[in-house]
Amino acid sequence: MFEHIDINYLLANYGYWAVFIGCLLEGETILILGGLAAHQTSLRLIDVIAVATLGGMLGDQILFWTGRYFGPRIMPKLHRQQAAIDRVSALIERYPTASIFSVRFLYGMRLVGPLVIGASRLSPIRFSLVNLLGAAVWATLFVMGGYWAGEALEHFLGNLKPYRLPILMGVVVIAAGVAWYRHQRAKKRAQGPQAK
């Protein structure tokens, strides 16, 4: 079934779009895959990083402006995210610039963080500039991680062309497993106070 899938064709034609959309929504898994693709295909490493930076920044800008205009209505409905909201709010009060930069690197803060920052009335220009820097560092780290993983796999396995699909499927399965585990942990945490 899978032997007829042309991974090169898919990556060459849709690789940048996949990276952009993946980073717009969440990102780390697609960044690692993008780095692997840059190592193994015609995708250029610098272009993957640039597209990932743009997607990551734009996603956070949308969340920031959503928080800016709809924060008072949205925040009370995010009961399950209250612990993350409180952490981001405390971080903004003490270290406003550092909170913008670091929120994408903190577990459980990637989506909630920019919403809270937008609702906090921090300067949009300040947010945009620091967000761009944070997105560039984030994209570079994860894409290079994928690229170096490709180098390491090639060192051990030789030519990776026959293994591209299994590697891709493996990364997707691992990412899905991590996402499921995180979801279960967050669910248990949310149910903890109610259970007592």
Image (cartoon, rainbow, N blue to C red):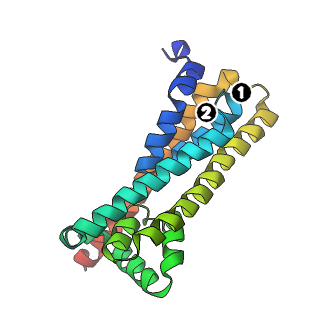
Q: Which residue is mark 2?
A: 167
The residue drawn where x is 48% and y is 80% is 96
Instruction: Kindly indicate the quadrant of the structure image that contains residue 127.
Output: bottom left
Instruction: Kindly indicate the quadrant of the structure image that contains residue 73.
Output: bottom left
Specify the farthest residue to the top.
4
The residue drawn where x is 59% and y is 39% is 34
The residue closer to the viewer here, 38 or 152, is 38
The residue closer to the viewer here, 13 or 147, is 13
Q: Is residue 164 left or right of residue 99?
A: right
Q: Which of marks 1 and 2 precedes in the sequence?
A: 1
Q: Position of residue 184 (x, y in %)?
A: 37, 58
The residue drawn where x is 49% and y is 75% is 99
The residue closer to the viewer here, 21 or 124, is 124
- The local crowd at label 1, few if under 14, some if 14 to 19, many if 20 or more residues have their Cα within 10 Å, is some
Q: CA distance from mark 2 to mark 1?
A: 9 Å
Q: Is residue 187 above or below residue 49?
A: below
Specify the farthest residue to the bottom.
94
Q: Position of residue 120 (x, y in %)?
A: 34, 78
Q: Position of residue 18 (x, y in %)?
A: 48, 36
Q: Is residue 107 above or below residue 2?
A: below
- The local crowd at label 2, few if under 14, some if 14 to 19, many if 20 or more residues have their Cα within 10 Å, is some
Type of amino acid under label 1:
Leu
Type of amino acid under label 2:
Ile
The residue drawn where x is 53% and y is 69% is 101
Q: Which residue is mark 1?
A: 160
Q: Is residue 28 visible in the rendered structure shown here? A: no
Say what secondary structure mark 1 lies in. loop
- Marks 2/1 in contact by CB < 8 Å: the verdict is yes
